[in-house]
Amino acid sequence: MKRKILALMLCAVLLAAFFPASAASAASPLGFISINDTLPPDLINVAVNYGNSVYVPYWLFTNYGLGVNYTYFSASSTAYMSNASNQIFFELPTGKTYNSDDVQFAAPAIFWGGTVYLPLGFVCSAFGGFTYRTIGQNEYGSILRITTGSEMLADDQFFRAATPAMKRYYDAYNTVAETPSQTHHPTAPEPTPTQQPREGDAVRLGLEGMPSAEMLELLRQQDMTVCFFLDAQAIRDDPDMVRHIACAGHSLGASCPEGSEAQMQETAQLLWDTARVRTILYTLPEGAVRPDGAVVFPAARTDMTADQLRESVYTVTSELDVRSGDQTLIFPSGDGSTAALRMLLYYFHDQGFTVAPLREPDGDDTPIVLR
């Protein structure tokens, strides 16, 4: 019992720190959103009602540790959300929502005040890891509580602890301006301005490491061929997969992390012995001596986690957004890479890029490499 009382007192102190005190009074209740045991001030009056569903801005999911990644493809006005278990596309102009298997859902995204808003209930059920419910209402407003399982307080305890902070913010908010209604009713979605497509530009894609069967199937479905850079141990471990890659029409290159002449010769010979591929394509560490006649690229990291790989997609797309012409990309391939590659291929399609065979970069084509 003492522990519960202490938790309530501690939570009340933390909540009180969010808001300035004010003695003023006003008339309009507020809509609060809490995350676990906190009541962030930037989540006040941000929810909207649309089609009998609660919608919240996309940044709520990315800024508060809810484990969902977000990106926006401006050329098609499509919002994309993903985590380790799911991928969802929201087409703003058409109102279509679907997953990576093209299963469609009646849960459109909307634009409201120039920001993408997403249906809270649908995102919660699609990605898991958090739940939400309205936990109480008083003269200051109501609280929609989102929890991830790490909360300390039960709903009634949290609402009591939050009430003093709700009053303080209610007083301050209504002192300075007329309060917007808690319940908003946005109209039909409106697309934002789009970027110019990159029709005619190519991405020359190299993948560092052994692919999964799922990745090869993804490339087959997209009718794309790329170059896989394999090291000597990967070739020895799975020679059948090496032959499968070659038979699927992909190029094979030698990944030589040490950069020694002996390693380059060994890896190239293994590719010949295993798949009868005579390669001139290498990934080498910085400072390694280039073999005569070889086409050399910097090596990408191969130890990235699935979450790091998904985050790296944003780095790649941001870089491609500010470049012009054909580009070379060396990206990791391996465990957890397929979801990240799927995101990249969607971006290429969205922007009008084609995927082309690797060639030696010229002075204007500095490779984009994940390191």
Image: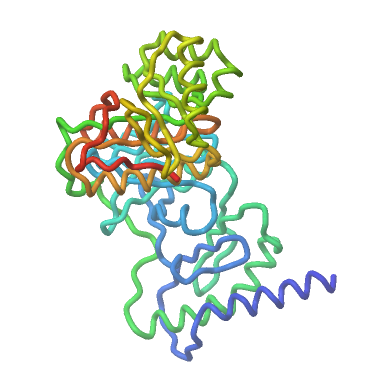
Query: 59 left or right of 72?
Result: right
Provide residue 143's location: percent of width, then percent of height.
54, 64
Residue positioned 50% across, 62% down in the render: 33
Residue positioned 41% across, 23% down in the render: 253
* Quadrant including the C terminus: top left
Provide residue 317's location: percent of width, then percent of height.
32, 44
Residue 246 drawn above or below residue 177: above
Residue closer to the observer: 85 or 145: 85
- The outermost residue toward the right is 1
Query: 115 left or right of 302?
Result: left
Residue positioned 44% across, 14% down in the render: 245
Residue 150 drawn above or below residue 25: above
Query: 84 left or right of 30?
Result: right
Query: Looking at the image, what colour scheme do you see?
Result: rainbow
Provide residue 18's location: percent of width, then percent of height.
53, 77
Provide residue 133's location: percent of width, then percent of height.
57, 53
Query: 112 left or right of 335?
Result: left
Residue closer to the observer: 336 or 363: 363
* Quadrant including the N terminus: bottom right
Quarter of the figure with residue 218: top left
Residue closer to the observer: 49 or 215: 215
Residue closer to the observer: 33 or 215: 215
Residue 28 drawn above or below residue 301: below
Quarter of the figure with residue 101: top left
- The outermost residue toward the bottom is 23
Residue 35 drawn above or below residue 251: below
The mark tally for this picture is 0
Residue positioned 44% across, 68% down in the render: 42
